[in-house]
């Protein structure tokens, strides 16, 4: 019940494309859902986050869609760039304890 | 404004030895959490410290212990190292009164056990 399932495991898109990464959870006690971006050899960097009482949040080229009834949320990256190539993790939080998905490796081709 | 800083960046230890990793939180943050990230996996929660006490703990053995100091910095100690302890150890800091949301991570300490 503490798991967060993330898909796909890897994703390749052309520059300008809109990659979509999906996550699902079971525990309705989760109260905060962040997305992190991680480059090789670096720590995860907070990209964008949403609370369960909001259905969508946009920050720059990044959008989170949240479906509370389905217990699913997704990350959309608009106008993707080669510099967006990284591993993306969704997470769900209870009192600051983060449960991470397995990660999605994104490659954006020029 | 310095972010979360961790030391050392890399470490090689022998099986059975003990290791101490250090973390300084982002300015204004008072809560420190530690995570273990195996290669190709998402980070796994080890424990969280607030007001110098362990507040939450993940599914890790007692070989993993920690400490938080009055200046909010923290240490992670691992005793009797196993080969399987080789991983990237991440420290994250947050602010308790914001519900410990917006956790910011350091660059990690890469521990290799040989």
Image (cartoon, grey):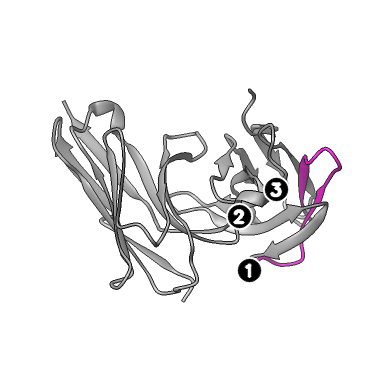
Residue topped by disc 2: B99
- Which chain's residue wears label 3? B
- Mark 1 chain: B
Mark 3 vs mark 1: give the one in front: 3
Q: Which residue is mark 3?
A: B31
- What residue is pinned by disc 1? B59
Whether callout 3 and callout 2 share a subunit is answered yes
Specify which label sits upstream in the sequence, 3 or 2. Answer: 3
The foreground one among A109 and B40 is A109
Q: Is residue B59 above or below residue B106?
A: below
Find residue B28 and report its horizontal and vertical position in percent: 69, 35
Determine crowd level at label 1: few under 14, some 14-19, many 20+ residues with C-alpha closer than 10 A.
few
Residue occupying the point 70% across, 48% down: B31
Answer whether residue A11 is magenta in the image: no
For image coordinates 30% across by 33% down, the residue present is A60
Residue farthest toward the right in the current orientation of the protein:
B70
Provide residue A106's location: percent of width, then percent of height.
Answer: 27, 41
Label 3 or label 1, whichever comes before in sequence order: 3
- Does the residue at mark 2 contact the one at mark 1 (Cβ under 8 Å)? no
B19 shown above or below A85: below
């Amino acid at each position: 019940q503490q798991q967060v399932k993330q898909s796909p495991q890897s994703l390749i898109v052309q520059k300008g494309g809109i990659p979509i990464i999906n996550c699902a959870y079971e525990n309705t006690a989760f109260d905060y859902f962040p997305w992190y971006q991680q480059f090789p050899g670096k720590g995860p960097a907070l990209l964008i986050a949403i609370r369960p009482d909001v259905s969508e949040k946009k920050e720059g080229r990044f959008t989170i869609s949240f479906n509370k009834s389905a217990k699913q949320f997704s990350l959309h990256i608009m106008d993707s760039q080669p510099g967006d190539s990284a591993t993306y993790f969704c997470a769900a939080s209870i009192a600051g304890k983060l449960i991470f998905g397995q990660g999605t490796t994104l490659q954006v081709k020029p | 404004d310095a972010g979360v800083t961790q030391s050392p960046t890399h470490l090689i230890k022998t099986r059975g030895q003990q290791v101490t990793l250090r973390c300084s939180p982002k300015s204004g943050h008072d809560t420190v959490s530690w995570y273990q990230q195996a290669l190709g996996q998402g980070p796994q929660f080890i424990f969280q410290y607030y007001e110098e006490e362990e507040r939450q703990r993940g599914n890790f053995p007692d070989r993993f212990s920690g400490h938080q100091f009055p200046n909010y910095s923290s240490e992670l100690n691992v005793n009797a190292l196993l080969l399987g302890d080789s991983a990237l150890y991440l420290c994250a800091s947050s602010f308790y009164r914001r519900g410990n949301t917006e956790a910011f991570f350091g660059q990690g300490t890469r521990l290799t056990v040989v």
